[in-house]
Each structure stands twice: as structure tokens, then as C-alpha cells.
Amino acid sequence: MEAPVTTWTDHTADRPISLTAPSGVDRAAHHRLDEAWLAAAWSHPSTRCFVVSGGQVLIDETPDGATELVMTPSFEAPLTEAHRYFLGTDEDGTSYFALQKDSLPGRMDQSARPAGLREAGLLLSPRDAGLMAHAVALENWQRLHRFCSRCGERTVIAAAGHIRRCPACGAEHYPRTDPAVIMAVTDGEDRILLGRQVHWARGPLLDPRRFRGARRVHRAVGAPRGPGGGRRHRRPGRVRREPAVAFPSSLMLGFMAHATSTEIDVDGDEIHEARWFSREELGAAFESGEVLPPYGISIAARLIELWYGRPLPTRSAF
Ligand SMILES: [Zn+2]
């Protein structure tokens, strides 16, 4: 995806999130339609594969305490009807595939365990997290596009998992990417604006105390509003990060925005409450439990952390 904005990798991070770091794997999209190349890559002794099922993979601890994706040489993988996704090659020439199955394989050893992206994304190396995110995203997309949106016929997998083709009308369906925007807003005193969503107070699994950087700020809380009227505040701040998001069809873009006014007008519809916090106030609110940080893998957590200047208190994803 290309956009006419200035982007750069954030080098201020104390604790980079694996999912957003370069994975070192070239997706090599030009090979996806080359069946002979794919067959040769699949049978090459250096090729590695792993199973993805329902958004989960097997992960394991290494002797030195790191966490890795459980991968096997492709020649050891049983030949099944499973969908095979080509994920790319690394600089050593190793090719990676994911096999989509109805269930994860039986544990080859005692320590391997299934994990989803929210947990594994924080534990795995950038390479493994990138491979997992790619595989989970393809699985999600494949699952939701089994029928042709043009004629309703059942579609078939093509391009090593990256296209769904309709045998009836010939349509080809590609994964689409809808950009979504989240921003952290600061004011002239370098305070941050955090909001609490209305529905968080209703769902039993969601914590009503959880504040976060308000999305759709201008509409939901009426800030920041510049003297130039309604358009000024739409001007984006700096793009901080373009993460590899594995949630279907969306690419979340994170911005830092600067408010030209500290006035807050909560709509009461999407946002229940919004407040400006200094770093000291937020630190105290974390300590007292008044405010709980967003989950570690979320871009909201990342944006707040960039402003906060040090890691947020950790919070389990489960
Ligand atoms: Zn069709």
C-alpha cells in the first residue's frame, strides 16, 4: 500500500511489538501463480511449514527461554487436502508455507501449545510473528470468501492462498484492505486525551474502567477543534506506524495528533467520558486502578506508550 504521507519506523521504542517489525521474509508474490516453482519450493529440504487452524498456531519455548513458532520441514508434513498458503522466502532462501486445517496437529512434544495472535504476537520473533499474522489473515479471509460475491457460486482457492476464483463466472477475488485510523491526541501542555467507550460499561468481558486514545476524535468528543472550523482538526498528525493487522480487511494506521483546543464535548453515544491526563495523572490512575491500559498488542497501547515515554503497566490479554 502506498500513500502520500511521510512514514518512518519508530526508533524510540523500548519494547518493539513483533507484529509491526520487519519480518525479514520477502512475500515473493510473483511466485504465487507459478505452480512449478511452488511445487519445487514445497519439496525443497530447507522449506518449513506450520499449521494454522481457527486463528491459532502451535508455539513452543526454546532452551534459551525464547518462544518460537513450531515449524516442520515440509517433506515431513502429511500430504492432505489442507489448503496450502505460500508465505514467502527469507534471505537465506528458506521458503515458508502455512497449512490450513480443521484442527492443530497432535502435540509432538509436551511443551508445544496452541496460541492465538494476541498472545503469540507479543512472544514470537518478528519473523515468526510476521509469518503467523500472514497465515491467520489469509485463513480469516478465505473463511469469509467461500462464495462468489458476483454470482453466489462456491469459489476455489488459487495463487497459493491469495486469490479466490469463481469457476462459474470467472471472477477473481482478492483480499481487500480498508484503512482505519486511530490517533492519540495531545494538548499544549502535553497531556493526552483518553476516552471511555459507552459499550464497555455493558459487556461483561470488557472493563468499564478502560480508557484509551479516542478514535474518531472529532466526532465523538468534539476535540480538537481549531479556529478554522471543522476541517482543521482532520489534518493528520504524523504517521507513526503501519502495522500488519491480521483482522479481516483492515489496516489500522496510528497517528499522533495535536489539539488546538482543550475543550471536550462528549457525544455520550460512542464515548461515555473523556479526560485530559498528564503523565503523572495517568501514572496515578494506573496505580489506583481507575484506568486500565489497553492490551499490549493493540496500537492504542502503542500510541499511549509512545507519549507516556515508558512501558505501560502490563495487562494480560486473557
Ligand atoms: Zn462468480
Image: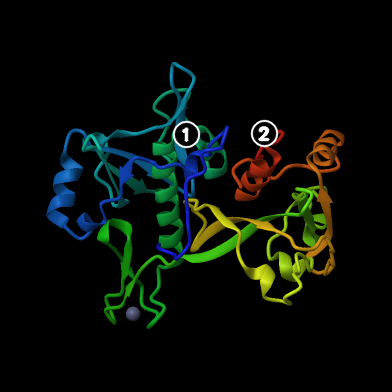
Q: CA distance from mark 2 to mark 1?
A: 21 Å
Q: Nearer the viewer, mark 2 or mark 1?
A: 2
Write the residue at 26% across / 79% down: 170
Earlier-in-chain disc, 2 versus 1: 1
The residue labelled by disc 1 is: 124
Q: Viewed as shown, does residue 17 lie left or right of 225?
A: left
Percent from the top left, x then y, of residue 195? 78, 56
Write the residue at 85% across / 36% down: 284
The residue labelled by disc 2 is: 310
Circle on res. 135? none
Q: Amino acid at mark 2?
A: Arg
Write the residue at 34% across / 70% down: 155
Element type where label 1 sits in the image: loop
The N terminus sits in image quarter: bottom left
Picture layout, residue 247 above or below residue 58: below
Percent from the top left, x then y, of residue 121? 51, 40
**Camera-side residue: 26 or 123?**
26
| Residue 295 visible (yes or no) | no
| Residue 152 visible (yes or no) | yes
How packed is label 1: few (under 14 Cα within 10 Å), some, or many (20 or more)?
many
Percent from the top left, x then y, of residue 32? 23, 57
Q: Amino acid at mark 1?
A: Leu
How packed is label 2: few (under 14 Cα within 10 Å), some, or many (20 or more)?
few
Percent from the top left, x then y, of residue 29? 26, 56
Q: Viewed as shown, does residue 231 lie left or right of 133?
A: right
